Image: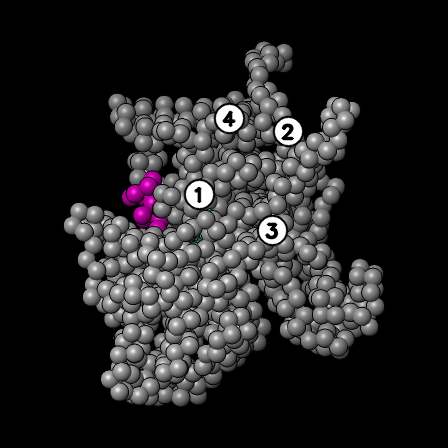
Amino acid sequence: KPLNHSVNSTNYEEKKMENSAVYNKDKFEESFVRHVESDLARNMFNCDDLGAYQAASNAIRDSVLVDWANTQQQQTIHDGKRVYYLSLEFLMGRAMDNALINLDARDQVAEAIGNLGFNLEDVLEQEPDAALGNGGLGRLAACFVDSMSSRNYSAWGYGLNYQYGIFKQEIIDGYQVETPDYWLKYSNPWEVMRSEIQIPVDFYGYVYEHYDTNTGKPKKIWQGGERVIAVPADFPIPGFNTTNTNNLRLWNAKPTMEFDFSKFNNGDYQQSVAAQQRAEALTSVLYPNDNFEKGKELRLRQQYFWVAASLHDIIRRYKKNHKDWDNLSNQVAIQLNDTHPTLAIVELQRILVDLEGLEWNAAWKIVQRVFAYTNHTVMTEALEKWPVDLVGRLIPRHLEIIYEINYFFLKDVEAKFPGDRDLLSRVSIIEEGQVKSVRMAYLAIVGSHKVNGVAELHSELIKTTIFKDFVKIFGPERFTNVTNGITPRRWLRQANPKLAKLISEKLNDPKYEYLTHLGNLKKLENFVNDEAFLKEWDDIKFDNKRKLAALIKETTGVEVDPNVLFDIQVKRIHEYKRQQLNIFAVIYRYLHIKKLLAEGLSVQEIAEKHYIPKASIFGGKAAPGYYMAKIIIHLINTVGEVVNNDPEIGNLLKVVFIPDYNVSKAEIIIPGSDLSNHISTAGTEASGTSNMKFALNGGLIIGTVDGANVEITREIGEENIFLFGNLAESVDELRHKHYYEGVKIPESMQEVFNAIDTGMFGLPEEFKSLLDSIRYHSDYYLATDDFDLFLDAHKKLEKMFGLGSGDPTHLREWVPKSVLSVANMGFFSSDRCIDEYAENIWDVEPLNV
Ligand code: T68
C-alpha cells in the first residue's frame, strides 16, 4: 500500500517539540501540576517525592503515548510484517529514567522538576523495579524490546503482568529470606489497562467429534470446562532517537462475568466466588527458578493462558486485513524465548485446523514458517518436560494435536532413516518413561523454521549434544547462532552518565549517536596513550566506586574503601556459575594474609608485596527451593562476618553480600567494578550478558572460556581479559575421571576446607553438603580442577591493578585495558543482535515512520 498517509516528518518533529511537555519546561510544569491535582487528587503543597514521581511519569507518559498511537497507526497503514516476541519474563527495571533518555528530554525535565522544588534523582528513586523476570533470559527480553523500538522495527512483546515479581531478598543472620514483591502497591503510571479487550481462554473439558455438514467430514470440537478472561495491560516502549514506540502487552487474568448461578442458587455463594478468584491467581506470581524446571500445574496453566491470549490477539489483528492463510508468515513472525511459549505452536495448528478448517499439512507448513525458537541452556535439568497426563487434563485437544505432530514427524524420520528404532525413540516428542512426558524443546524444534543458541560456543554445543539428532534430521540449516547483546541506552547512558558523557565528548558526538552505532566506540582507541584522558577515565571509575561504596554501606553496614580493587560477582546463585569457587578463593586469601600477619608483616608490606587491598562483592538470589545455592549465600555472609570484623586486617580484605540484587542495583554496581567474575564451568553458561555490561562500563573480566566470554575476548583482545580454566571439550573427561578415579583436592583448596571444617566460619555442619558435593560426590562443576588456575589468574591481574588510582602501574597497565575493552564492545549492542534476528530469522526490515 502507498504510504501516502504518512506525516511529513520534519513538520511532525517541529510540532512535537512545540507541543510536547517533555521538550518545553513551562508545558511540563503545567502538566505536572495538572496531574498532581487531577490524577493524585492532591495539591502541590502536600506532594511528596512519590507523588512527584507519579505526576512526572504521567506527564512524560502523555508524550510517549502520542508517539505510540502514531507508531501503531503507521504500522497498521503500512501493513507490513510484524514481529511478536513471546517471553514469560520481561525484567524491565525502572521506566521513567529510561523514557527520559530515549526521548532525549532528561535535562529539560530535570530542570522543570527542579523549578517545582524536587530533585530528579530523588524522584527517580521512588519508582519500584518492574522485576517480572529471574535473570539473564528476562533481562534479554527487556533489552530486545528497547532495541526493536530503537531500530524502528514493528514489533510487540507479549508476556504476563505478574502482580508479584521476583521475590525480594533479605539477608537475616546470614541466610536468604524471601518476601513478596508486591510491586503494584501504588498504581503504575506506565501501564495502560485495555479493559475493552477481553479474550476468553478455556481450560479442561473434553473433546468430541462432530460431523461437519459443510465439508462432509468429521471435525474435532473442544468443549472447555473452565473459562478465564485475558485483559491486556500495555506498556509503551519508546525507542532512542526515534519516535518509533512499540507495545509490550502483558496479560492479566480476570474471572468471567458469567456467574455460576447453579452454585449460587444452591446457596453456595462462597464457592462460586472462590472459583472466580482462582482466575486471578493465574497471573499473580512469577516462578522464581532460573535454569531449573519444576513441573507445576499452575505454571503450565500460565503458559497456556498467555499463549492462547497472545495468539488470539495476533490472529485477530491479521484477520482485519487478510483472508489468505498462506500469507500469514509474510505478515507474522513469532519468536519463542525459550520453550516456555511452545504451546503457541500447538495453539496455532489448532486454530488453523479446527477453527479455520485448513487441511493438516497446509496448516503445519504455515506454522513452521511463523515460529522460531531460542534455546538458552544445554543443562538437562533446565529443559522443560510436561507429564502427558497433566497436559491431557488441562488442554485435551492440544495433547491430541501434539500426538499427531509427533506421529507425522516420526513418520518422516522413519522414511529418512529406515529401521533406526533407537533414533525414533531418542527424538520422539513424547518421552516414554516412568512418567510419560512431552519434551517441549523437541516440539519447539519440530514446529520452527529456525532454532538459535545465544553465543557461538553455545550454538555449536547444542548442535553436537542435546540436539544432535535433529541436525541429522533437519540439516544444519535449521540451526543458527545469534550472540546476545545488551542495550547501551540503559547499560551505559543511564547507568553511567559520566562515562557516557566523556565518550560523547571524545567522539565529538554531542547527540550521543554512538548509542545506536556502538561500533563508533572504536575511536576511543586513539586516546589510549593520552595520559590526561586516562586520568579522567579513572576518575570517573573512582566516582562510580564511591557511589557503590555508599550503596554497600547503606545495605550491609560495611564500609569499603573506594581505593581498593572492587572484585564483583553478581548474578543468580547457581552451582554452575560457581560462586563457591570465588568464596573459596576469598577464604584462601584471608588465611594467607593472616599467616603473613602472624609472621610479623605489616598491612602495608602485605599490600605492596603479596595481596593488594580488595573488596569481594557478591550479590544474587537463590531459587527458594535450591538448597545448595542457599548454603553458598550463607557461607559468603559468614565469611564476611569474620573478615570484616577482624581488627588486624585493615583494608586488605572486605567481603560483602549486597542483598536483593536487581536491575536498579545493577545500574549502580556494574559501573563501580574494577573486575567482575564470569567463572562458570566451561560449556554451562549459554552466553552470559552481565559480562557485556561490565566490559562496556570499563570493568575488566576474569572468566572461563565459556559463553560469550569467548567472543568478548575475540573483540577486545586476549591481553585485556583474564581467562583461565579447563575448556568445554575437557569437561566430560574430567567428570569421568572424578567418577571413576575419585576427586583430587588441591592443597590450596584443602586448606580452605580445613578452615571451614574447624568452624572458623560458624557451624561446620552448615556447609557440609557443599564441601561433600566436591570431595565425595564427584565435584560435578569441576571446582577442584579450576581452583589453582583461578588463584594464578588473580595473582597475575592484581599486579597490573597495582595499588589503585594514584599508582603509576595502575594508570599505565590497568586503565588502558579498561579503555580498550570499552572501545571494542560495539558488537555486543542488542541492536546488532536484533538486526541479525530480523535478517536471518524473521525476514523483516525497519519501518521508518
Ligand atoms: C540465561 N538463562 C542463561 N534462564 O543462563 C544465560 N530458565 O547464559 C544467557 O545469557 C541468558 O539466559 C540470556 O540468553 C536464564 O536466565 C532463566 O532465567 C530461566 C527462567 C525460567 C526457566 C528456566
Query: Looking at the image, is mark 3 or mark 4 nearer the viewer?
Result: 3
The N terminus appears in which quarter of the rendering? Answer: top right
Q: Nearer the viewer, residue 191 or 62?
A: 191
Residue at x 40% of width, y 44% of height: 382
Residue 392's mark? Answer: 4
Q: Residues within 10 Å of mark 1 (few under 14, many from 20)?
A: some
User: Mark 3 or mark 4: which comes first in sequence?
Assistant: 3
Q: In the rendered structure, which disc, 2 or 4, sits on the residue that comes first in sequence?
A: 2
Mark positioned earlier in the residue sequence (3 or 2): 3
Residues at badges 1 and 4 in contact (C-beta under 8 Å)?
no
Q: Amino acid at mark 4?
A: Gly
Residue at disc 4, secondary structure:
helix
> What type is the residue that disc 1 sits on?
Glu
Between the residue at mark 2 and the residue at mark 1, the CA separation in whole angstroms equals 26 Å
Tag 3: amino acid: Tyr
Residue 590: name its quadrant: bottom left
Badge number at residue 670: none
- The residue tagged 1 is 293
- Are there few (<14), some (14-19), or many (20+) residues within 10 Å of tag 4? some
Residue carrying label 3: 164
Q: Is residue 366 above or below residue 266?
A: below
Q: Which residues are magenta?
A: 454-467
